[in-house]
Amino acid sequence: MFASSSRAIDEPGLERSAADVNVQIRALWTRAGASLSPVEQERYQQLLVEWAAAVKADVVPAA
């Protein structure tokens, strides 16, 4: 079900932008409605980790 959308997590070097991951998070919640199944909760947690890493990678250190 989530095989194609989890490739960036499973394959090194395939990093997505925070915006791309956010699209996946929004799509997951749209499909799920008001509550997530255990499988969807796991996928959501994976996406949050990926999103946080993408946001961190986009941060430019202050001079």
Image (cartoon, rainbow, N blue to C red):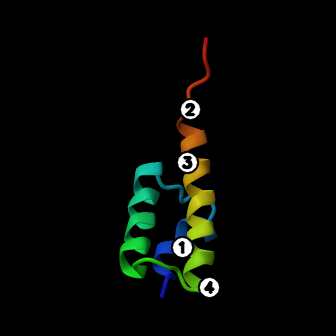
Tell which of 7 and 25 is nearer to you: 25
Neighbours of disc 4 within 10 Å: few (<14), some (14-19), many (20+): few
Q: Quadrant of the C terminus?
A: top right
Nearer the camera: disc 1 or disc 4: 4
Nearer the camera: disc 3 or disc 4: 4
Q: CA distance from mark 2 to mark 4?
A: 32 Å
Marked residue nearer the N-terminal end (1 or 2): 1
Q: Which residue is mark 2?
A: 59
Task: Identify residue type, mark 3.
Answer: Ala
Q: Which residue is mark 3?
A: 54
Helix, strand or loop at mark 4? helix
Marked residue nearer the N-terminal end (2 or 4): 4
Q: CA distance from mark 1 to mark 4?
A: 16 Å
Left or right: 5 with respect to 46? left
Residue at the image position 54 percent from the left and 60 percent from the top? 14
Q: Which residue is mark 4?
A: 38
Q: CA distance from mark 3 to mark 4?
A: 24 Å
Residue at the image position 46 percent from the left and 50 percent from the top? 17
Q: Count the labels in the image.
A: 4
Marked residue nearer the N-terminal end (3 or 4): 4
Q: CA distance from mark 1 to mark 2?
A: 24 Å
Task: Identify residue type, mark 1.
Answer: Ser
Q: CA distance from mark 3 to mark 2?
A: 9 Å
Marked residue nearer the N-terminal end (1 or 4): 1
Marked residue nearer the N-terminal end (3 or 2): 3
Helix, strand or loop at mark 3? helix
Q: Which residue is mark 1?
A: 6
